[in-house]
Amino acid sequence: MAQSGVRLDPSARAHVDEAINNWLEHEIGDAILGDAQNFVPKRTGRLRESLRREVHDKVLRVGSLDCNYASDVELGTGPHVITPRNKKALSWPEADHPVARVNHPGTKPSPYLRPALFQRRTP
């Protein structure tokens, strides 16, 4: 078989990877992040403000890195017991008296990341 006269630049792979990362971050990532910020429930705004997008080695990640209840909002929670961490009892303004524990019924899911991810995107 005859050798072809075509040679590929050894740095071509790096250029292609950079272009893919750039496309993921600024085209797809920005769109998904914007939709997630629009879909997220807004009680205090903390979760919305914590949402970020990042790309590393052609992998896009969108979500919250520092809001500890982000997955609870997305997926909901099952029934669980709440106990005090630093005190002997729990109390809140509407409570009749302090209590040692609360049986929380759980919360319904409020998906915001999955709907943002599954939006139909056109070029």
Image: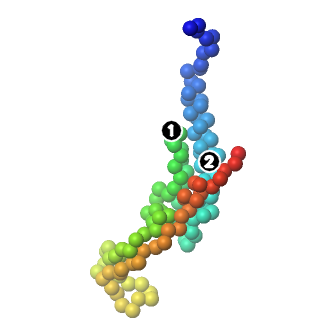
Q: Residue at x 38, y 84 (%)?
A: 91
Residue toward you, 48 or 35: 35
The quadrant holding residue 10 is: top right
The 10 Å Cα crowd at callout 1, few under 14, some 14 to 19, many 20 or more, is few
Name the residue at 44% across, 63% down: 68
Is 27 on the left-hand or right-hand side of 107? right
Residue 100, above or below 40: below
Q: Horizontally, is 33 left or right of 82 in the view? A: right
Q: Which residue is mark 1?
A: 57
Image coordinates of residue 60 in percent, x first then y, are 53, 46
Q: Give x and y (percent) for residue 107.
A: 46, 73
Which residue lies most toward the right here? 123
Residue 9: which quarter of the image? top right
Identified by mark 1, the residue type is Asp
Q: Which residue is mark 2?
A: 28
| Disc assigned to residue 14 | none
